[in-house]
């Protein structure tokens, strides 16, 4: 069974920084894309950033220049460094990964989410 566990959320003042981590565990043969999404109250879940296994990244316009996604393939872990945080970054942040476990296909897995609250 594959699990994604996020950590690193919390309360921070506007202008501050947080670093989120997403660790994948279980029977893992390969991880393709890893991504961070966020969902604010009353809003749709949106993708914040994604990173491929070879390190290519894509960011939402709202976080470009402030957030950095990275990964450690040896640890099956992705990170989201969030700087210059704004009140509008407040949301539950979810990790998502495409993982090949015991069969030939990649399946999408989600973490349980971690709350990020930015006070203005």
Image (cartoon, rainbow, N blue to C red):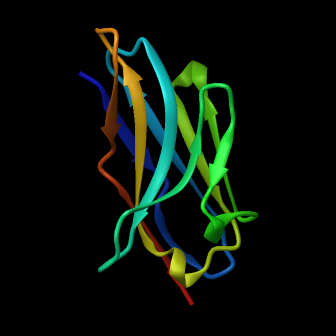
Which of the 4 image quadrants contains residue 4?
Answer: top left
Q: What is the quadrant of the N terminus in the image?
A: top left
Q: Position of residue 70 (x, y in %)?
A: 65, 40
Residue under the image location 50 percent in, 44 percent down: 35
Residue ranking furthest to the left: 1
Outermost residue, right side: 65
Name the residue rendered at 32%, 36% in the picture.
109
- Residue 38, percent across and down? 43, 62
Q: Residue at x 42, y 46 (%)?
A: 95
Q: Is residue 20 above or below residue 53?
A: below
Q: Return the residue nearer the eye: 62 or 5.
A: 62
Q: Nearer the viewer, residue 81 or 35?
A: 35
Q: Is residue 58 above or below residue 23?
A: below
Residue 46's spot in the image, x, y percent? 44, 62
Left or right of 64? Residue 112 is: left
Residue 76 lies, with reference to residue 4, above or below; the image says above
Figure quadrant of the C terminus: bottom right
Residue 64: horizontal and vertical position, in percent? 70, 63
Residue in the foreground of this view, choosing between 71 and 15: 71
Residue at x 33% of width, y 34% of height: 108
Find the residue positioned furthest to the bottom: 120
Q: How many marks?
A: 0
């Amino acid at each position: 069974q594959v699990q994604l566990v996020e950590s690193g959320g919390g309360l921070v003042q506007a202008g501050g920084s947080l670093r989120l981590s997403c660790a994948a565990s279980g029977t893992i043969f390969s991880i393709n894309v890893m991504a961070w999404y966020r969902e604010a109250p009353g809003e749709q879940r949106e993708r914040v950033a994604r990173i491929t296994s070879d390190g290519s990244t894509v960011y939402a316009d709202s976080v470009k220049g402030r957030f950095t996604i990275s990964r450690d393939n040896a640890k099956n872990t992705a990170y989201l460094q969030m700087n210059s945080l704004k009140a509008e970054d407040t949301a539950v942040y979810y990790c998502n990964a495409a993982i090949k476990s015991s069969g030939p296909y990649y399946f999408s897995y989600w973490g349980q989410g971690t709350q990020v609250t930015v006070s203005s």
